Amino acid sequence: MIRKARVEDSKKIQEMINFYASKGLMLPRSLSSIYEHIRDFFVYAIDDGIVACAALHVCWEDLAEIRALAVQEGCDSKGIGSRLVRSCLEEAQQLSISKIFCLTYIPQFFEKFGFRIIDKNELPKKIWGDCINCIKFPDCEEEAMIIELDKASK
Ligand SMILES: CC(C)(COP(=O)(O)OP(=O)(O)OC[C@H]1O[C@@H](n2cnc3c(N)ncnc32)[C@H](O)[C@@H]1OP(=O)(O)O)[C@@H](O)C(=O)NCCC(=O)NCCS
């Protein structure tokens, strides 16, 4: 079941993100940063706890980012990652935000939802705050992708 995250989910969220961060697939997150942004997060809960997370982070008047998408190993390829992305897109629509971007090494995954690759320079400079602190900066191979939701369907 997908639900909004609760504060008590924070440590497990950090564990999942930092597991993939240690493999170079995501940026590591501090617990403090997760607490501060806990309202951004959706989680996928099963009986024993949560096994996946994703966050919709509002950046600007008409721009939000999907980030921190992680599905625990062993729970992947069951549609959980896709459901989390769709929940983020639905929330963006409810917030009347029509442009959602992501920075990713797996553009094939995001293309399924209608995201398209763009030049990173098309994103506001504000976005690069996190990147500057990344050890891979500026030689990062992540793709910037964006989707424009149908304003008419808001
Ligand atoms: C990427 C991730 C979120 C996908 O979650 P998931 O629950 O397995 O996704 P779904 O089951 O909804 O979709 C699976 C499909 O996504 C695509 N996909 C998943 N991982 C992929 C990858 N690394 N490269 C290319 N395509 C991928 C495939 O088409 C896959 O289909 P398959 O199961 O038939 O192989 C998950 O594998 C994960 O947490 N990966 C590590 C962290 C990460 O890279 N996060 C994304 C940061 S932007």
Image (cartoon, rainbow, N blue to C red):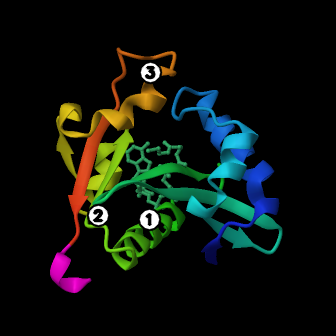
Question: Which residue is drawn at the image coordinates 64% and 37% (left, top)?
Answer: 29
Residue named by callout 1: 82
Counting from the top left corner in percent of width and height, residue 129 is at 44, 30
Left or right: 8 in relation to 143 = right
Which quadrant of the structure image shows residue 58? bottom left
Question: Which residue is drawn at the image coordinates 44% and 21% (left, top)?
Answer: 132
Going by the numbered disc 1, the residue's amino acid type is Ser
Between the residue at mark 2 and the residue at mark 1, the CA separation in whole angstroms equals: 8 Å
Q: Is mark 3 within 8 Å of ligand 1?
A: no
Residue named by callout 2: 113
| Upstream in sequence: badge 1 or badge 3 | 1
Q: Is mark 1 within 8 Å of ligand 1?
A: yes
- Can residue 139 be spotted in the picture? yes
Residues 36 and 1: in front is 36
Residues 122 and 103: in front is 122
Task: Tell me: residue 10, above or below residue 84.
Answer: above
Residue named by callout 3: 132
Task: Tell me: residue 121, above or below residue 113.
Answer: above
Between the residue at mark 3 and the residue at mark 2, the CA separation in whole angstroms equals: 28 Å
Give the overall secondary structure of the magenta segment.
Answer: helix
Going by the numbered disc 3, the residue's amino acid type is Ile
Counting from the top left corner in percent of width and height, residue 25 is at 51, 33
Residue range in magenta is 150-154
